[in-house]
Image (spheres, rainbow, N blue to C red):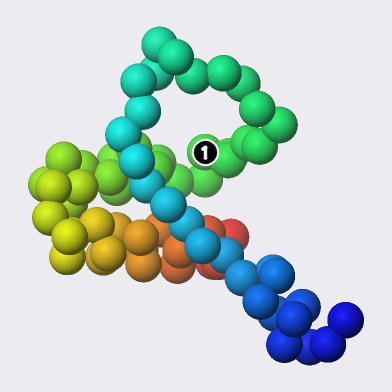
Amino acid sequence: MSATKAERKSRMKPFVKYVNFNHMLPTRFIAKDDFEFRNLATEDKMNTQEGKKGLLKELKAKFQER
């Protein structure tokens, strides 16, 4: 596999969305509680497009730091 293709496949692309916790099912993906995700995603940030972009950049930086 070429270096560019390997980099593209290993790139991290975070996403944020509203979730109803009553309908969540367990998955094999676990995010440890090194930092609190729910406190970062506030309603103010989720309502505006600029806030959501900033939130995604902040989450990506936190995940890459880990």
The relative height of residue 62 versus residue 9 in the rendered view (above or below) is above
Locate the N terminus and report the quarter of the image it occupies: bottom right
Outermost residue to the bottom: 3
Camera sees residue 50: yes
Locate the C terminus and report the quarter of the image it occupies: bottom right
Q: Which amino acid, mark 1?
A: Asp
Residue 30 horizontal side relative to residue 16, left or right = right
Q: Residue at x 34, y 41 (%)?
A: 17
Outermost residue to the right: 1
Q: Residue at x 37, y 47 (%)?
A: 16
Where residue 4 appears, x then y in whole percent?
A: 72, 87
Camera sees residue 62: no
The relative height of residue 39 versus residue 62 in the rendered view (above or below) is above
Where residue 19 appears, x then y in whole percent?
A: 36, 28
Residue named by callout 1 = 33
Total residue callouts: 1
In the structure shown, which secondary structural element does the residue marked by tag 1 occupy? loop
Where residue 30 appears, x then y in whole percent?
A: 63, 36
Residue 32 horizontal side relative to residue 19, left or right = right
Mark 1, other Cα within 10 Å: few <14 / some 14–19 / many ≥20: few
Q: Quadrant of residue 59?
A: bottom left
Q: Residue at x 44, y 46 (%)?
A: 35
